[in-house]
Image (cartoon, coloured by chain):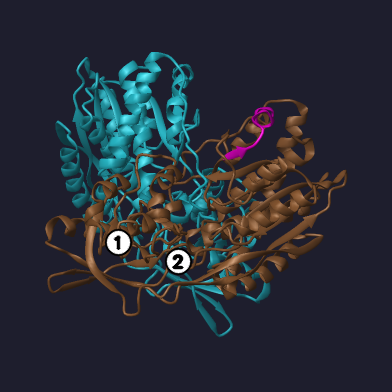
Chain colours: A brown, B cyan
Amino acid sequence: MRWFLFGSFLYFFTGSVKAQSDSVFIRKIADEIFQHSTAYSNLHTLTKTIGPRLSGSSQTYTAEKWGQEALKQAGAERVYLQKAMIPHWVRGGRAQALLITGKNRQSLAVIALGNSVSTKSGGITAPMILIHDFDELERRKNEIKGKIVFYNHPFDVDFVWTFKAYEEAVPYRAYGASRAAKYGAVGALVRSMSSSTDNFPHTGAMIYNDSFPKIPILAVGLQDADKLAATASSEKDPELFISTNAHALPDTVGYNVIGEWKGSEFPDQFITVGGHLDSWDPAEGAQDDGAGCVHSIEVLRALKAIGYKPKHTIRIVLFTDEENGGRGASAYSSEAKLKNEKHIFALESDAGGFTPREFSFKGNESQVALFRKNLPLFAPYGVTSFIMNGAGADVDPLNDSTGALAAELIPDSQRYFDYHHAGNDVFENVNKRELELGAINMAALIYLVDKYGL
Amino acid sequence: MRWFLFGSFLYFFTGSVKAQSDSVFIRKIADEIFQHSTAYSNLHTLTKTIGPRLSGSSQTYTAEKWGQEALKQAGAERVYLQKAMIPHWVRGGRAQALLITGKNRQSLAVIALGNSVSTKSGGITAPMILIHDFDELERRKNEIKGKIVFYNHPFDVDFVWTFKAYEEAVPYRAYGASRAAKYGAVGALVRSMSSSTDNFPHTGAMIYNDSFPKIPILAVGLQDADKLAATASSEKDPELFISTNAHALPDTVGYNVIGEWKGSEFPDQFITVGGHLDSWDPAEGAQDDGAGCVHSIEVLRALKAIGYKPKHTIRIVLFTDEENGGRGASAYSSEAKLKNEKHIFALESDAGGFTPREFSFKGNESQVALFRKNLPLFAPYGVTSFIMNGAGADVDPLNDSTGALAAELIPDSQRYFDYHHAGNDVFENVNKRELELGAINMAALIYLVDKYGL
């Protein structure tokens, strides 16, 4: 694109004086974050000096220390920990898989799913059976025994909102092992939950049904999944070898890391802003959910830096164990209820550090309807709609337990599942300006909710 | 992000029966493109087998051949070339620059600007003078003689729409050399037009004012620009060495590559869709503007594939020489006027293959106002506003010459200037789904304009 084309470009904002002063204040938030944000440098530290943060791993604890320090640096008046018992599943080294056809052995890009049991020592070799969906599994239930089931249910690329494709495909990851074990399968492989163009395998939580034997389950990269599917239709009797040492240890202790900024008018009423500190382990948990943690810390830092005084008490919460059980969210919402705390609003960022497009809400629809008058204030920064489509795993429970309106930042979703739970979820795949725009929209939302209530 | 949160998510579209059938048709376009698009594979071929396509380079001609073939494959009924005389500037190998302080010599990441003259053989060494803007240049005009001017005017990060920052900074690239030469400078260096976090230098067109001596000018990467600025304030008498063999050859011949699809009702009325085939040379011209070429070809392919019959004649134009003079656009708009062709609409894609957000128009504002009723049809695919902010370098002249309404796809701009005219504008930095969404919105716009007129 050539340089001389762009004439002046102004966003017009017409509205009441109140809305104009809000628009000026939000512009101040944006300038502060674009010029002085620590979100990107915080993310660099979290991803590069701590790295993957699987529940129960040693990085769980180094990340908690980092979080406390980062919250203090951002200006939290009180930083404390909230205990939760968290799962402690260990990967036990890299899983392996081979496709065996006649005398040929081809290595596959695989990763064990979270909570998978191990194979027997030395691995398992068994015939492969290609299954496209659970209906086919039921129809062919008599062919499953003694085999390794390969679920090849692809992402539906037609959904513009990629989370919808994920929602549709993820039952194969979550329940595939037990549903195959019901019919005598000895192991399972699942096509990664992605529509990327690469071959990274994507891990994530799976759940056993205790009624059936626990069989090991791995995810396979998309290129290798296509290769397996082609082989299943072209070769006679292909076999799979799979091997993993994954196993669960007893639950251990983790902590939500909480930073508080006391409200001037309603100190006993809370606004929560958070992301989750844990991550899956193949990479650095940069988009999922380092971005959400540094977004939340930046909301505090930026509002303080420009001299805002909140009416309500603002809590930044770095939740523990979102990925493998949600124990941090349970602890936070349970304690809020137990203490009869008044929570008016909770905002989460857990869909990546991409350019923002929407906020999604869970709770009282009439509150959102009233709040919708503020939408034009967000448009210059990327958010162009408010939808009622749930909030997020870490704040939904607070809506359930306290009635607080819950919300989630919804960034553009096109790239999210390229990185989700995979070896390329690294700092380098987060764009600084996109990350900062997320924090700007979040801080603007918190400012408006705090100033005017709901 | 955990798997089980996302409930069903529907876009509601309420409107007339007409609008409903349009919404169904646009959904068909989207499904076709998400499932069968050749945009991404075309881009792979263009970037990886042809590569950089500087006006006058041998790749100008291999790209023209590729374009003709790709248009035929996409279903163009008639493919032809339109001649234009284009500049033929050659880089002459890599430029070099050193920062010299005392006995220290530090190599800098630099690239010659397009149209720069060479240094004398063996390069130039001269004192560096740091200049922040043209006002400062004027104030310090007596200090310039015999020096190398380093323009360190940064991108203004506060603009959400990054092209605005570009517009503000780019005069230093375009006019900096002659304005410094006016006061006796022997060379110039300019901070790259970007706010990225890396050190790639960004090239682009510069223009000499023939009233002053022509001095060589290079762009420097942002990290090195910051280093130079720090050195200028901490060290005594820093010098710069610069060297480039860049030079201009006589104009040569280039061609717009045009594919036509004849209209059934108004075959003599034209709708143009295009991008530019040339690119700067440090990388592959993937975002700028391979994306726009494959977007445009995909509009044709997809509409044909789903059985659409256009009323007007649709022309896909791969423009030559957008980057270094716009000679292809001049040829196209001049010939349209000369032949008295009736052009109703022209759409360009030249702001990258990122997720679409807007269309910008140039022309009759009342046409756009009437067309705005169609905006809800685009929202599910990312475009949420129509603005009057000019179209693009390749279609604006057609508005001038024929009165056709001109438009440009405006994708999200946060990452654009990370890659623009730099060594990282490669295929790998284009996301398949984001690219496809651009083509979907463009095809939807062309469909509506063709079906209902303007």
Q: Position of residue A185 (x, y in %)?
A: 30, 61
Q: Residue at x 59, y 67 (%)?
A: A46
Q: Is residue A251 rendered to the left or right of residue B117?
A: right
B3 to the left or right of A39: left
Secondary structure of the residue carrying tag 1 is: loop
Q: Is residue A327 above or below residue A19?
A: below
| Residue, disc 2 | B110
CB contact under 8 Å: marks 2 and 1 = no
- Is B285 drawn above or below residue A90 in the view shown? above
Q: Which residue is mark 1?
A: A185
Asked if residue A344 is among those painted magenta in the image, a careful observer would answer: no
B338 on left or right of B367: left
Vertical order, A314 against A259 (above or below): above
How many C-alpha atoms fall within 10 Å of the one at disc 1: few (<14), some, or many (≥20)?
many
Q: Chain of mark 1?
A: A
B265 or B278, which is in the foreground? Answer: B265
| Mark 2 crowdedness (10 Å alpha carbons): few <14, some 14-19, many ≥20 | many
| Quadrant of the rendering where the C terminus of chain A is positioned | top right
Residue type (three-letter) at the residue carrying disc 1? Ala
Task: Please give the name of the residue rendered at 33% of the width and 35% of the height, measured from the top-left corner.
Answer: B30
Measured in 3D between alpha carbons, the distance from the residue under mark 2 to the one under mark 1, in whole angstroms, is: 60 Å
Range covered by the magenta-colored residues? A359-370
